[in-house]
Image (spheres, coloured by chain):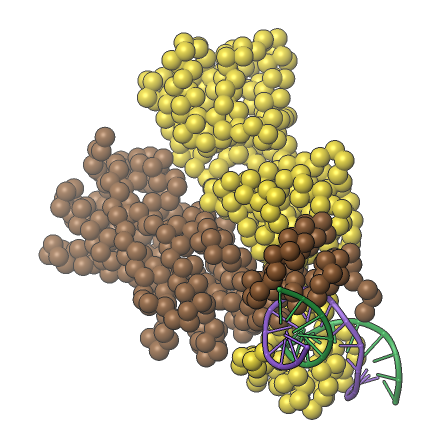
Chain colours: A yellow, B brown, C purple, D green
Amino acid sequence: MTRSRNSVTIRDVAKKAGVSVATVSRYLNHTGPVSHAVSERLKTVMTELNYVPHAAARNLATHKSFTVGLLLSDIGGDFFAPLLRGIEDTLAEHGYDLLISSTRRPQRWRGKQLPVGPHNTDGILGFADSLDETHLHQLAERHFPVVLIHRTPPADLLVPSVTVENKAAARAITSHLIEVHHRRRILFLQGPPEQEDSYWRETGYRQALSDHGLTLDPALVRRGDFEQQVAYEAILQAHREGVVFDAVFTGDDEAAVGTLAALQKLHLAVPEEISVVGFDDQRMAPYLTPPLTTVRAPTELVGHYAAQRLLELIQGGAVEELLTLLPTEIIIRRSCGCSPS
Amino acid sequence: MTRSRNSVTIRDVAKKAGVSVATVSRYLNHTGPVSHAVSERLKTVMTELNYVPHAAARNLATHKSFTVGLLLSDIGGDFFAPLLRGIEDTLAEHGYDLLISSTRRPQRWRGKQLPVGPHNTDGILGFADSLDETHLHQLAERHFPVVLIHRTPPADLLVPSVTVENKAAARAITSHLIEVHHRRRILFLQGPPEQEDSYWRETGYRQALSDHGLTLDPALVRRGDFEQQVAYEAILQAHREGVVFDAVFTGDDEAAVGTLAALQKLHLAVPEEISVVGFDDQRMAPYLTPPLTTVRAPTELVGHYAAQRLLELIQGGAVEELLTLLPTEIIIRRSCGCSPS
DNA sequence: CTGTTAGCGCATTCAT
DNA sequence: ATGAATGCGCTAACAG
C-alpha cells in the first residue's frame, strides 16, 4: 500500500524523542512508569509534531472504541433535542463519543446489520422501536452492552431500560379533568401502535375513568399517532360521527397541537366547551392557545440516565437497576380550564 | 494479550468457507473477481456466523472511516433538530456515519485537541463558533476536509461554508415594518457578539433604515443574545430608560419569545402598539401570541448542503462552490400588524 | 524505568 | 479466480 499521508505516528514521536514506542504509549495511557525527564520531552515533542493517536489503531489493539451508538427513530423531532443533550453531556463527561443513526422508518434496519454495534462502538442506546427484537437478541447473545430508551425489553431479556412514569401521570391528569372540571366524556388519542408510552397513558386514562365510576365509551378512544395532522383529522372525524365529548387527552403534545387546531376550526371553545390536555411538555406547550395543561417528562434526564446506565454496563459489566423510571409532573396551564397566574 | 472475545473475524468466515481471507475481502469490497460459487458460499457462511467486519481494523488498513464529525455549540437548542436531520439524512444516504460533539461553552476545546478530527473521521462539520481559528488552520494545513456551518472562514482559508441569506431578508422584513406598518422607531436586538448571523441581520436592518431616510438611534440597538431571558430583560431595560419604540426586530425567534413576554408585562399591545418580528421561523413561531412574523431559514437544507459539500471534499478532494448561501423567505403572520388568513 | 516484539482484523500487493 | 504475505498504528506482554 502506498505510504500513508502526512499523519504523524507514535513512531515519529518516539524517534524524535529518542525513546521507544512503548514508552510513548505508556506516557500516553499512564499505563506504566515514565521518568519525569522523558515525560517532559515527550510532551513538547508531541505538541511540536501535533501528534494525535490514531483512533482506529488504538481501537484495534484494545478492543475498545470509547464511543457509543445511538439508534433513533426521528432525529428531527422536537422531542429529541433535550434527549440528545442529556446523552451527549453525560458521555462527554466520561470521555465517550456519540455515534448517531436515525431513521424515519423504524423498519429500515430489519434484516440488515445495524449501523452501530459491536463492530464500531462499545455499546448502544436504542430509542423506542428503533431496535427490533431480532437485533436485540443477537446483541444480548454476544453480551453487548445495550440500554433501551422509552421502551422496556422483552420479558426474556435482561436489558436495562430508562423511561418515564406514564401511567400514574395519565391517571392523575385524567382525574383532574374529572374532579376539577367535571368532565365526563373524555376523548383519548392513542399514539402509534406498539408505542409503549401510549399504552401506559391509555391504561392510566382508563383507570382514572373507572376510579370515578365512569364507563368507557369505545368511540372515545381514537388514533392520534402522536402527530399533529393525524390528531387533527381524528378530532374532525369524531365530530363528524356525532361523537360528543367535553375533553380530550391527546396522548402527547404534538397531537395536542392538531387537536387545538381542529377544535378551533369546529368553533368549539377551549377550555370553555372542551378541556384539552397533553403529555410531554414540549417546548411549544406554553405558547399554544390556550397554554397547554400537560405532563412534564424529564427528557433530558432520560438521556442522562440512559447514558449513565450504558456506561455502567460498559465499564462494570453490570448495572444496578434494570428499570429506571423517571417521575413526571403535571403542569397546569389553561387548556384544561384552570386559570393559573 | 488475552485471546479476543467471541467476535467472529474474517479469518473465521474464510476458514468455514474454505477460502482465503483475501477472497473474503474481495467479496466484501467488490474489489476483485470472485467466482459465483464462492460468492454464494460466502454469503451463507457470513449470515450463519453473523459476521460484521470490524470497523477499526478496516479503518486502519484503508485510512478511511466513513464517518464525519460534527462540532456543535449546543445540541439541545430547538434550532439543531432540523439541522441534524438534514445532516444525518444526507450522510446516511451515502453510507457515512455521524460522530457528534457538542459543548455549551465554545471555548471548551481551545488549546486541546478536538474530539473529532483526522484521527477518527474523514472530515468534519463545524457549526458557527464551535471551531476556533487555531484548529481551523491546523486542519487546513493538513488538507483535512472541513466545512463550516453558519460561519464563513477567515479570509486566508479556502474552506467551504454553508449558511443562509441574512442581510437581504433582514432588510426586507425591516422595510415591511416601515412601509406597510409605518413604523419609525424599530428596536433591534443583537445576537451574541461575533455571531455572524447577527452581524448580517443588523446590517440589513441598518440598510433598510437608511433606504427610507431614517436615521438610526443608537439607543434602539441592544443585546438580546438570541436568548429569551436576555431579550426579556433588554426590552424591560429599554422601557425603563424611557426609550420609545414602535417595533422590535428581535434578531431571532428565541429572543422574540422573550420580547413578547416583556411587552405583555409592560401592557404594550402587539401588534397594535408595537410590531414584533423575528428570524428563523422556529417550531414555536406560529404558536406565539400573536403568531410571529419572521424569516424562514431553511435549516434542514443547511444541514443537507453542508453534508453534501463535505462529502464532495472527502470524495473528490475539491468542492465546486466555496460559499453556499441558502435563500430565506419572509413569513407574514400577525405580530407585525398584518392579518393573514 | 525502558526497549523488543507480537499481534489486533482487515486490505492489498504479488504470485500462481 | 485465488492464496500467501506484508503492513496499517497502536497496546501489551515480556525481558532487561
Relative vertical location of residue A130 with respect to residue B97 in this rendering, above or below: above
| Quadrant in which the C terminus of chain A is drawn | top left
Relative image position of residue B37 (x, y in whole percent): 64, 56
Say whether residue A172 is left or right of residue B157: right
Whether residue A291 can be seen here = no
Relative image position of residue A299 (x, y in whole percent): 57, 41
Relative image position of residue A8 (x, y in whole percent): 59, 81
Question: Given the current orientation, which residue lies at the most extreme left position?
Answer: B213
| Quadrant in which the N terminus of chain A is drawn | bottom right
Query: Quick one: A72 or A85, which is closer to the camera?
Result: A72
Say whether residue A34 is left or right of residue B98: right
Q: Residue at x 51, y 45 (%)?
A: A103
| Quarter where residue B290 is shown | top left
Q: Residue at x 17, y 55 (%)?
A: B208
Q: Residue at x 20, y 51 (%)?
A: B172
Relative vertical location of residue B152 with respect to residue B328 in this rendering, above or below: below
Q: Residue at x 44, y 34 (%)?
A: A286
Relative image position of residue C3 (x, y in whole percent): 77, 88
Say whether residue B159 is left or right of residue A10: left
Relative vertical location of residue A303 with respect to residue A214 in this rendering, above or below: below
Relative vertical location of residue A246 with respect to residue A289 in this rendering, above or below: above
| Quarter where residue A239 is shown | top left
Say whether residue A6 is left or right of residue A229: right
